[in-house]
Image (tube, rainbow, N blue to C red):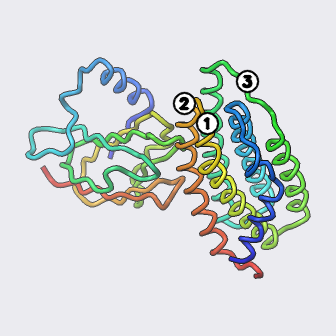
Amino acid sequence: MIRQTMFAVALAAVTPAIAQDQMNDLQIAHTAYTAGQLDIRYAHLALAISENDAVRAFAETMIRDHTAVNESAVALITELNVTPEDNDLSRALVEGAAAKRAEFMALSGNDFDCAYAANELGYHQVVNQTVEGKFIPWATVEPLKALLSDALVTFKVHEGHAEEMVAGLQCAS
Amino acid sequence: MRVLSDATRRRFGLLMGAGLVAPLVVRKAAAHDGPHMIEAGIEGFAFVPDRLEIRAGDTVRWTNHDIAPHTATDKAGGWDTGRIAKGESAEVTFEAPGAYTVFCRYHPNMVAEIVVEAT
């Protein structure tokens, strides 16, 4: 638990803009989409490296669900005829994820599974706190607010699954 | 057990849109007055309702209201709707009496029970 919490704090440290600068709708849309795409990339890495059935099943779920959420986001963006706006938080997420993937690629077996599982738990904790506490209150366009609310339901289930995945692995404390 | 094809699902959707089969839609048959279409939902990562009591020959139609795709799958392996995307529906006709545990293959924590009574 301590390790998970520390990881979440570390992940949050990569994204200092979360708690500070209010974002507009186009920035929120960009960051939410980016966060989903990054989790899909983590999942593809997990499928390439892990041989653990639970980890692989979780990764497949992340690809399936985040793809569905992002397809809904693209549909909304198309409907509204707007262009999401890149921003500091999106860039920080991309940079942080690149570094994390580099760490993962040096791992294998149980070490990888534990690192991936802990990252997924921390990632979803931070994302959920941000979506619920910041993005939804900040969003001014009702369809975006509705999409984020629907997505949050999915992400919270993912967080619960990640907790189960972490608990099911034999990881060093 | 009969799982309707995508084409059948689409045809059914068209019929529903035209209101031609609306009288068939009921929650539960109080008496056996012929096969019924039972409307059920998938929402908030749960089957709604999570227990159905139906008659042999009835069809359950699940509509997914979540962004994430789901399935309605027989835990015993007898049938599987396949992927149900947001806003889509899938149907299973229950011809044999018995108790069925339904789960989502993508999110196995989602479960429901269907009890099929003889006509």
Residue B105, percent from left and from top: 51, 54
Between B64 and B119, the one lying in front of the other is: B64
**Residue on which the image places disc 2:** A143
The answer to whether A163 appears left or right of B8 in the picture is right
Q: Residue A89's quadrant in the figure? A: top right
Contact (CB < 8 A) between labels 3 and 2? Answer: no
The chain that hosts pointer 3 is A
- Residue drawn at 80 percent across, 42 percent down: A90
Residue B94 versus residue B111 in the image, above or below: above
Q: The residue tagged with tag 1: helix, strand or loop?
A: loop
Amino acid bearing label 1: Ala
**Residue on which the image places disc 1:** A139
Q: Which image quarter is the C terminus of chain A in? A: bottom right
Q: Which marked residue is nearer to the observer: mark 1 or mark 2?
A: 1
First in residue order: circle 3 vs circle 2:
3
Q: Which marked residue is nearer to the observer: mark 3 or mark 1?
A: 1
The answer to whether A73 appears left or right of A30 in the picture is left
The chain that hosts pointer 2 is A
Contact (CB < 8 A) between labels 1 and 2? Answer: no
Contact (CB < 8 A) between labels 3 and 1? Answer: no
Residue B19, percent from left and from top: 26, 21
Around disc 3, counting alpha carbons within 10 Å, would you say few (fewer than 14), some (14 to 19), or many (20 or more)? Answer: few
Around disc 2, counting alpha carbons within 10 Å, would you say few (fewer than 14), some (14 to 19), or many (20 or more)? Answer: some
First in residue order: circle 3 vs circle 1:
3
Residue A83 versus residue B60 in the image, above or below: above
* Distance in Å between CA atoms under marks 3 and 1: 15 Å
The chain that hosts pointer 1 is A
Amino acid bearing label 3: Thr
Q: Residue B93's quadrant in the figure? A: top left
**Residue on which the image places disc 3:** A83
* Distance in Å between CA atoms under marks 1 and 2: 9 Å
Residue B56, percent from left and from top: 20, 48
